[in-house]
Amino acid sequence: MKVLKFGGTSVADAKNINRVIDIILENKRDTVVVVSALGGITDNLIKLATLASKGDMGYKTLFSSICERHNQIIRDLIKPKEKEKILREINIKYKELEEVIENIFTTKELSLSALDAAMSFGEQLSVYIISEAIKNRNILCEFTDARTLIKTDDKFGSANVDIEKSYKIISNYFKNKKNLSIMGGFIASTQKGITTTLSRGGSDYTAALIGAALNVSTIEIWTDVDGLMTADPKKMKDALLIPEISYSEAEEMAYSGAKVIHPKTIKPAVLKGIPIYIKNTFNPKGVGTKISNEKENRK
């Protein structure tokens, strides 16, 4: 069994989502897929909530553009006979988001819990669209709400996971499941079911938690670069790919600001000895970077 996680740039538009689905379909048996919000949507949701909290009516225009972006992707991905049904279903999510934002507008208060609720819709919307697009290719795919699996405290904005309880829930949930499962990353919930988030970039952490709970063979983080590099390739053209690196070295890079992997991701994998692969959605045949303890063991 393996976990595949796809970041925001990987699911930024219909063309990219089709690439992601092609990769998923090559690994469809005994696979759990974790996806982020569409690229840029989380930032827009933060802006949406902020505008509403300031009483700025411009939030309505931004809300409409967020909905239209998702609707356009549905129109681009889904066959005509299924399109209208899916658009009707996603309108329910839009109404839920609208209620959250209108409450912020009314109270003129943006609490961390309200912001978490608003931000969570990025993943809620993306995972629904991608799961329906996979089904549209006649592949069995089960949508899972990560908030029912990952339990946290009420430190909104950067919640702490109840590892023991979450692992038990995850293990029991997947015990007899054989079909492809897909969920949104980044989001979780308190013991009372209130939506929380795992801090920005937390979808990597979601993938690691699922992988560790299920003792999977590998965790694959799919992004828009070929793997971990010796330097930021946007700043240094001669940056080289690091094909293999130890957990400790990768953790050090993450805490030093390497944006390819979330710092919290390493720990669950280390404790279970699960290798993490950093792969490029736009170059799926590339070698990527393997993160494991093998390099340390050879020293």
Image: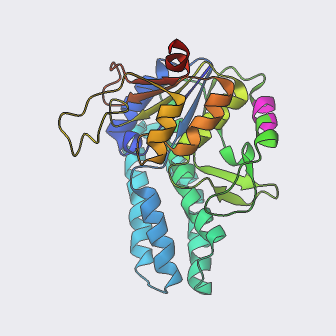
Quadrant in the picture for residue 98 = bottom right
Residue drawn at the location 66% of the way across and 44% of the way down: 146
Q: Relative to 13, is 268 above or below? A: above
**Which quadrant would residue 269 be assigned to in this image?**
top right
Residue drawn at (68%, 29%) of the image:
271
Q: Residue furthest left?
A: 237
Give percent across and percent down for residue 199.
Answer: 57, 55
Asked whether residue 184 appears in the rendered view, the answer is no
Which corner quadrant of the image does residue 238 belong to? Answer: top left
44 up-or-down from 259: above or below:
below
Above or below 115: residue 207? above
**242 sits to left or right of 210:** left
Is 170 a magenta residue?
yes
Query: Is residue 238 rendered to the left or right of residue 221?
Result: left
Residue 65 lies in magenta, yes or no?
A: no
Residue 275 in sight in this render: yes
Residue 188 screen position, x and y as percent: 68, 51
Residue furthest to the front in view is 299
Percent position of residue 101, x then y? 56, 73
Question: What colour scheme governs how the chains and residues are painted in the rendered image of this protein?
Answer: rainbow
Q: Main secondary structure of the magenta part?
A: helix
Determine the residue positioned at 77% across, 22% down: 176
Which part of the image, by quadrant, shows the N terminus?
Answer: top right
Which region of the structure is painted magenta?
Answer: 168-173
* Residue drawn at point x = 53 percent, y = 16 percent: 294
Q: Which residue is most to the top? A: 298
- Tell me where residue 29 appears, x and y as whole percent: 59, 17
Instruction: Please tell me which residue lies in front, 112 or 97.
Output: 112
On the picture, is 110 further left or further right than 47? right
